[in-house]
Image: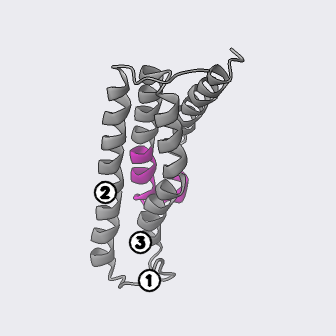
Amino acid sequence: MAALGLPKEYGYCILVAADSALVIAYLGIRVGRARKQFGVEYPKMYDDDKPIFNCFQRAHQNTLETYPQFLSLMLLGGLQHPRVSAACGAVWLVSRLVYAHGYYTGDPKKRMRGAFGILGLLGCLGCTISLGLNLLEYI
């Protein structure tokens, strides 16, 4: 039977997770500011007359759609590979900011500047798979 312990370096994963909460809050604040700037009242999620607002909203919403997968993969993978998982998590976080700022230009194609985040997410996935295989004593 495999036993799990928290390596000292797991603190890096915890710090990246804390930073991720700040990124999520920042993106949410930007949506709130855009609501005021473009006059989009609650509870409207989107406004067909103000596509630039929709860009702010989508940048935040898309991040929220992938956030649970990111966080669970980084934290689980970090149990065995804390430095790699934390580094991959940091890459994902930076990519979300680049993605959002590309979207904020009003040209949705510019959001793809943050597409490199998939590398961070895949790295976290690899670390998590490695953990699972190790626990099952396949590797």
Q: Residue furthest right?
A: 138
Q: Which residues are magenta?
A: 96-110
Q: Residues within 10 Å of mark 1 (few under 14, many from 20)?
A: few
Q: Does 103 lie within the magenta span? A: yes
Q: Does 105 lie within the magenta span? A: yes
Q: Residues within 10 Å of mark 3 (few under 14, many from 20)?
A: many
Res. 106 in view: no
Depth check: 112 or 90 in front? 90
Q: x%, y% of residue 79?
A: 47, 26
Query: SS of the residue at dot 2?
Result: helix
Q: Residue at x 31, y 35 (%)?
A: 15
Depth check: 118 or 21 in front? 21
Query: SS of the residue at dot 3?
Result: helix
Q: Which mark, by number, is residue 25?
A: 2
According to the image, label 3 marks what residue? 53
Q: Which mark, by number, is residue 10?
A: none
Q: Residue at x 41, y 41 (%)?
A: 93
According to the image, label 1 marks what residue? 44
Which quarter of the image is occupied by the C terminus?
top right
Q: Residue at x 41, y 84 (%)?
A: 43
What kind of residue is marked 3? Answer: Phe
Could you give the CA–CA distance between mark 2 and mark 3, rounded to whole angstroms? 17 Å
Nearer-N-terminus badge (2/3): 2
Nearer-N-terminus badge (1/3): 1
What kind of residue is marked 2? Answer: Ala
Q: x%, y% of residue 26?
A: 30, 55
Q: x%, y% of residue 45?
A: 46, 77
Depth check: 51 or 36 in front? 36
Can you say whether 44 is above or below 131 in the image?
A: below
Can you say whether 62 is above or below 128 in the image?
A: below
Q: Main secondary structure of the magenta part?
A: helix
